[in-house]
Structure formats: structure tokens, C-alpha cells
Image: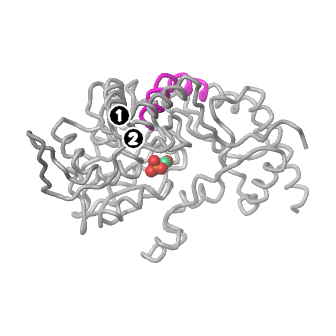
Amino acid sequence: MNDTPFLPFTRPSIDERTIAEVSEVLRSGWITTGPKCQALEAALSRRFDGRPVRLVNSGTASLELALRLCDIGPGDEVITTPMSWVATANVVLAVGATPVFVDADAATRNIDLDRIEAAITPRTRALLPVDLAGLPVDRDRLNRLAAAHGLRVVEDAAQSFGAQWGGRPIGSFGDLVSFSFHANKNMTFGEGGCLVMNDEAEARRFELLRLQGVQRLPGGGMEVEAWGAKANMTDIAAAIGLGQLRSIDDFNLRRRQLARRYFERWDRSLGFELPSEDTELHGNWHMFQPLLPRAFAAARPDFVAGMKALGFGVGVHYPAMHLFSMFRAMGHARGDFPVAEDIGERTVTLPLFPAMTDADVDRVCAAVTTVMAELQGVRP
Ligand SMILES: *Cc1c(COP(=O)(O)O)cnc(C)c1O
């Protein structure tokens, strides 16, 4: 055992200036949606090449309302990946449509673009890809596929804020792009999300969808023509967001440095499969996720417990979604998506967040070696 503090797999970085700015909002008399939300939407829009951006209170709300913006509902199919947080498919169910899974690609762990075409039916309305761990799906191929089949694209970019494709920031091009600002994401407001859209007309419809469908009329009246959710963001959260936005590029730079150090210090003889090295630096290194050696897949709980005993938090992101009982009840079974299943059984999320030191990475690597030696000792 050591006496250094426990290192979680992630931890948000909130600076004192941001904390002071949140206090100002709390003292201001206006704490829900207001000037801070407006300022944050404008700042985000500038990052995304002037495209309209609207904030909501979660990434899940952003995805669900994006599907509603596309008029996707009962009878429609949305193609997505089983290797994601369950929100990605839950939002499809929430609008009454059917999530159609396509297996992951073993190299990127994102949706396998080669298998999408075979999953398209006359009912398919949209593609809902995920940038797992912040490594972007190939946007050129994705958008070409969507255009060839007349499909909308709702990018679940919950994990890829600050990532790039072809030198352009994710969000600054494409169709609808959804981000999350949950506490574990590279940029966080505690909770929150936003959608990047194509034009002001879409943004206006999204504003109605996010807050009760209420239209404000000149002279102080109001009108409601259609249902809307309750998904607006607070100025308290937006003040955190404005502070995070000052630092996000430094955060992501630091994440890349730490990821590089993992690759340098990792003991390759242990037999893990490391994530794609992403030498062109498209990604934002939202997570660092080696896959356990196959012979140790069943020992993952012991690996997690062994790391915890040495002072390191290890997460599992994610078990393949189609094996959850809700999706089994819809007809899915083991063997449907073997690549996602294999990743889901072996993936471990190791500590990676901007406040970590290089020495922290070295300590994690040493602990992994120690724990694997222990596990090997108790196995034939
Ligand atoms: C975090 C996340 C979401 C949901 O975002 P929330 O803000 O937690 O609602 C959706 N998809 C992916 C891939 C995520 O990582």
C-alpha cells in the first residue's frame, strides 16, 4: 500500500475564478436561463464557425430533442452503436422509434462504417454515431453515407468536445451535433448539454422543444402550438460553462500529453490491447481504455478491485448495450454484435484527467503491472 491520495479515473477541474463567477450569479437575483446562457451560446457558436447552438440541461435532452427536431417517431428506425452509454439508445426509445444497432469496429471501437449500409431499411431515418472516448467517427465517410441514403445525422459527440476531423472542430460542420457537459466529460457544467444546428429556423424550433413549446408574443402574450420539454439550462451552470470554455483547450492538450505518456510507459508484454494511438491527434482523449488480455476478461472485477486496493479508480465504459435485459427483451442476444461484446467484456477506463501529473501515469502503469502479476499468480 502507499499513502498517496486515491486517484479516481476522472475528476473535474474548476478554477477559483469560475467559482467566484458562479457566486456572482447566485447573488445577482437571476439564476435560471438568462444572460449567462446567452453569452455561452454565443461563445460556443463562435467555436463552431458561427453555426447556431442552443443549451439544454443534459446531453440526453439534447439528443432526444434533436430526434424530435427531425420529426423522428414511431415506425422510424435510427442506426446507432451498442458500444456507448445507454442514453444513446434510450433517446431513440423515448421518441417512440427503434434503435437499430450496428457492431463496432475493433480498431476505433466506434460504429463500423462498413456495416451501416446493410442495416439501412425503408424505415431508417437517421444515423446516430458516437465518438467513443472522444475519438471521432470518420466524418467524411459518415456524411457521404447519409447523403447517399437521404438520412439525417445526429452526432452523439457527448465525449468529443474539442476533437477534430480533417482539421475542423467537431461541431463546426455536419448536420446536428450534440454535446454533453456531464461531470465526467472533458468540459463540464455539472450537468448540461447543447445542440449545434444548421440554421436559425431549426434553432427557433429547438427553443420551443426545449421549453414547453411556449412562444412569446409581442405585447407579453404567449401561444403554444405543440408539445415542448422542460430542458432549459440555468445561468448557474452557464457561468461554470463560461469558465470551462476558457480552459478546455488547455485541458485537452494536457489529456493528449498524459495519453502519450501512457503509450510510452505501458508494459506491452502484459498483453493488453491499447486504444488506437490516434497519431493525427483527432481525438480529445476523453478516456484511456486498454482492453484486458482475453484470458483475463472474466477476471475484470479482480483487476478493478486490485487497482482500487493500490489507490487507483478504474471504470467500465461500457458493457455492450444490447446485452442489457431491456434490449434482450426486444430480441437481442449474445453473438449479435461480437466486436462490441468483446470490447464490453475487456474494457477498463484508467485514470486520465487534466490535473494528473506525469508521475501519476507512471504510478498507474506500475500498478497495472503489479495487479496483472497477482492475477497471473492465481491463474494456471
Ligand atoms: C454522457 C453521454 C451521454 C449523455 O449525456 P448526459 O449529459 O449525461 O445526459 C450520451 N451519450 C454519450 C456517448 C455520453 O458519453
Q: Which residue is mark 1?
A: 37
Q: How dense is the environment of label 1, judged by Cα within 10 Å: few (below 14), some, or many (20 and up)?
A: many
Q: Is residue 253 magenta?
A: yes
The image shows residue 189, relative to residue 248, as above or below, that is: below
Residue 141 found in image quarter: top left
Q: Is residue 267 left or right of residue 59?
A: right
Left or right of residue 193, residue 201 in this image: left
Q: Which residue is mark 2?
A: 234
Mark 1 near mark 2, Cβ–Cβ under 8 Å?
yes
Some atom of ligand 1 lies within 8 Å of the CB belonging to the residue at label 1: no
Where is residue 272 shown, x and y percent of the image? 71, 46
**Pointer 1 or 2: first along the chain:** 1
Mark 1 element type: helix
Q: Is mark 2 within 8 Å of ligand 1?
A: no
> Which residue reaches farthest left?
219
Q: Which stretch did the figure color magenta?
A: 237-256
Which circle marks residue 268 in the picture? none
Query: Residue at (32%, 23%) from the top-left corner?
Result: 46
Q: CA distance from mark 1 to mark 2?
A: 7 Å
Amino acid carrying label 1: it is Cys
Residue 280 at x, y percent in the picture: 51, 26
Q: Depth check: 80 or 222 in front?
A: 222
Q: Given the image, on which type of amino acid does mark 2 rest?
A: Thr
